[in-house]
Amino acid sequence: MRVRVYVTLKPSVFDPQGKTVTDALHSLGYGAVGDVRQGKFFELEVQAATIDEAKQIASEAARTVLANPVIETFRIEVDTPVAAGAGAGL
Amino acid sequence: MKFAIVEFPGSNCDHDAYHAVKHVLGHDAEFVWHKDTGLRGADVVVLPGGFSYGDYLRTGAIARFSPIMRAVSEFAAAGGPVIGICNGFQVLLEAGLLPGAMLRNRSVKFQCEFVHVRVEHTDTPFTAACSPGQVLRLPIAHGEGNYYAEPDVLERLERQRQVIFRYATPDGAVTDAGNPNGSINNIAGICSEKRNVLGLMPHPERACEAALGGADGLYVLESIVKSVSSGAVMAG
């Protein structure tokens, strides 16, 4: 099952890279872009029977190593598995 | 007296630490590979600077899972002196042996320069040979040394006198002008509650001889020697 983990700095934590990107965008004329926050994106292939199980495994991995809970938060998305045969032959 | 210098893949100040201990201080130094599980009877553990695991994911994030870190944690829990320099500090933070985390420098640049730090407290094994308020001139070389801790953690660090070094001007004023990376409260180094674990971003081992541009790092290294040889700090 494919699981996506998004890791971002907590809102209370200053993001020097995001600030630099914001300034660059503004200097390029993208005045419509407000704040930019930079983060990390992981795609995990997880062996799991259910979506809940995949989420649980990914959450544990995120808490343990992918994110640093002192400064970061994370969000998890799981692709809904396509039923066998669905979409075939179209 | 024996210093164990832990080598992770990507450590690059391991030999600087070895030289400082062995050739400048004249004590025993031994490299310990990150896959080792014992510290070979060392009296002091050094986590050196560098880029362990290429700084992948976050600085120090992978190194903290190295087999040797279990022995380092046990050594620290038993009261043994552990000093983490630069990347070693980042590893100690990721391992939870010290509180807080590192952010990218506010300049978003790798800062490589001599800075000044003020010694805040001398009742640690790492500053026992310093005088209170002494200003040390030491080099830094890092991209992620912008120390951060949540307000309650920061308050506790200050109250328990765990902030040991602060970035300052050459005359010892703790101001924003003396802060090279944006660290909160100008924090350059902190110790554990039991005061036997120190993490600092500046490199004392790279400033231990006049030929290296300065020798103020000796105050830190000789503090360790003084504290260990007097029995003020030991594992066990």
Image (spheres, helix red, strand yellow):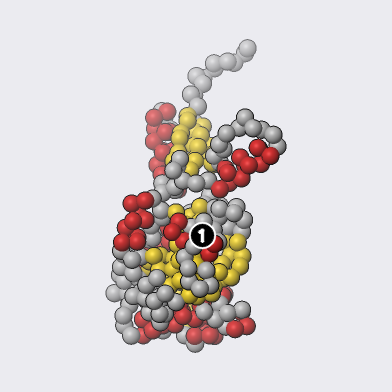
Residue B137 seen by the camera: yes
Task: Give the image location of residue A56, x and y in percent.
Answer: 39, 36
Q: Residue at x 40, y 70 (%)?
A: B120
- Residue B162 in percent (x, y) is at 35, 65
Quarter that holds the N terminus of chain B: bottom left
Q: Residue at x 43, y 33 (%)?
A: A54
Q: Chain of mark 1?
A: B
Quadrant for the C terminus of chain B in the image: bottom left
Q: Residue at x 53, y 49 (%)?
A: B57
Residue B165, picture quadrant: bottom left
Residue projecting furthest to the right: A28
Q: How many marks?
A: 1
Q: Residues within 10 Å of mark 1 (few under 14, many from 20)?
A: some
Dot 1 corresponds to which residue?
A: B176
Q: In x, y percent, where is residue B42?
A: 40, 77
Looking at the rendering, which quadrant does residue B232 occupy? bottom left
Residue type beneath disc 1: Asp
Label 1: state its secondary structure.
helix
Q: Nearer the viewer, residue B65 or A69?
A: A69
In this picture, residue A67 sits left or right of residue B19: left
Given residues B234 and B31, the one toward you in this image is: B234
